[in-house]
Image (tube, coloured by chain):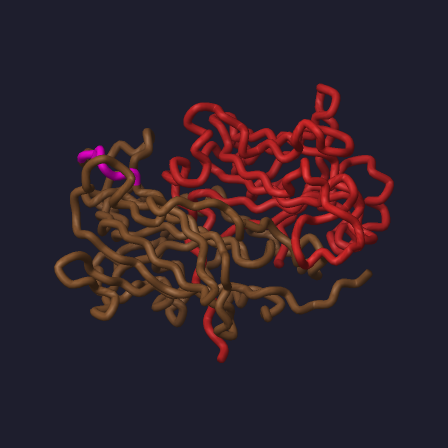
Amino acid sequence: MSKSRLDLANQPGYAYEPYHSTAKRAPVKPLIFLPHTLTERTGPVFGDLPIAETEHDLTRQHAGEPLGQRMIVEGRVVDEEGNPLPRTLIEIWQTNAAGRYTHRLDDFRAPLDPNFNGHGRILTDENGKYRFLTIKPGAYPWNNHPNAWRPAHIHFSLFGPSFVSRFMTQMYFEGDPMLAYDPVFLAIPDQAKHRVIASFDLSLTEEKWALGYRFDLVLRGPDATPSED
Amino acid sequence: MDLIHTANQPIGPFYHFALTPGWETGDNSAGIMAGPDARGERGRVVVRVLDRDGSPVTNAMIELWQADAGGKYNHPADKQEKAPDPAFHGFGRLATDDQGLCVFETVKPGQVQSQAPHINVSVYAPGLLRRAVTRIYFAGDPANESDEILSLVPEDRRPTLLARQGAEAGEWRFDLHLTGPCETVFFDV
């Protein structure tokens, strides 16, 4: 079951002065409350999407292995009451170990890795669980302010059960000193910051193979409102 | 149990290779929602994304979600007793180009229950810390007059939700102003 609205007290606002590109892009007029109709209670369904093994193992998408620290990212996708959200599509994308995206507009002077694309997909299982194998992304500079660096992160995009549950976030790493300077992360209210930080987890770590990080996600569940026919 | 929803974060500028790979080559197939056999009135929905100054936003991503021409969603929560059109995909996703434009090939949605034909729109862009949600309605549709959602929008702002007939037949143009004097109406869903 879902709460009827996203609790904005735990979300970044649109306008956040230290993140400069919000100035020309953040909506400023009050949002209009939209009572949920069938349009919001439905949404694209991806439960039967064929997804190859190599889409959730980002280290096996090329003939050779990518450079960098091998890393498992595992977690569960649940609703705000802790119920698992099965068969939901997760899409991720990230830089390589040197902090460079495989994107033609990324002009950071760091090497590309011919063995790493940096994107993956998976459907959660019946218990809402997912697991990616990847390499640890790097930090990279951006133009927001002098000597600005984005902390290492992995982008996550999830659909959930309906239009209202659709959402995107970024996963950061426990203890990263760059978080303290990053306006994108700092835009999140303090009490909600911990939810976007993955923690090192020895139980997910595979001996002589890969470090394990846990990253659970909480999103809106199925809407309980009965349809008004 | 009552858990804090994970915080939204922006899409960032370098998502295309993962989410909209067709952008690189000009391949618009992820925006083709109506297959050749789809029922209903075919049309192209041209979305243009603009910033506060009216400049095109060239790295936004737009997702559309709509009913088929019969007003049916292909989703288990739609219990209406009619079959979804198998030649229609209710979901489309494209990145804007260097003019801030993206073009979806779809059909005009049917009325859903008592609602006027409409398309739900999700907007993501660098500089947008959370998804922005709006709706496209069709200018001139008589059902707009009694639409329950449109009636919640102050009258002077309703035109921001209307797609207008373009120069070509079957072309619907929708300008999406993220902010500025003509800011599009965004919804709290």
In the rendered image, residue B100, in percent from the top left (x then y), is placed at 52, 30
In the rendered image, residue A228, in percent from the top left (x then y), is placed at 79, 63
Chain rendered red: B
Magenta-span inclusion, residue A112: yes
Residue A130: quadrant of the picture: bottom left
Above or below, A177 relative to B122: below
Q: Which residues are magenta?
A: A111-117
Quarter holding the C terminus of chain B?
bottom right
Q: Residue at x 32, y 51 (%)?
A: A154
Q: Is residue A146 visible in this depiction of the protein?
A: no
Residue B63: quadrant of the picture: top right
- Helix, strand or loop for the magenta stretch, by majority: loop
Q: Is residue A186 left or right of residue B187?
A: left
Front-most of residues A5 and A33: A5
In the rendered image, residue A75, in percent from the top left (x then y), is placed at 36, 64
Q: Is residue A210 left or right of residue A144?
A: left
Q: Residue at x 83, y 38 (%)?
A: B141
Q: Is residue A53 visible in this depiction of the protein?
A: yes
In the rendered image, residue A206, in percent from the top left (x then y), is placed at 20, 62
Q: Is residue A57 left or right of residue B154?
A: left
Residue A102: quadrant of the picture: top left
Magenta-span inclusion, residue B124: no
Front-most of residues A220 and A45: A45
Chain A color in figure: brown
Q: Residue at x 27, y 49 (%)?
A: A150
Above or below, A201 relative to A117: below
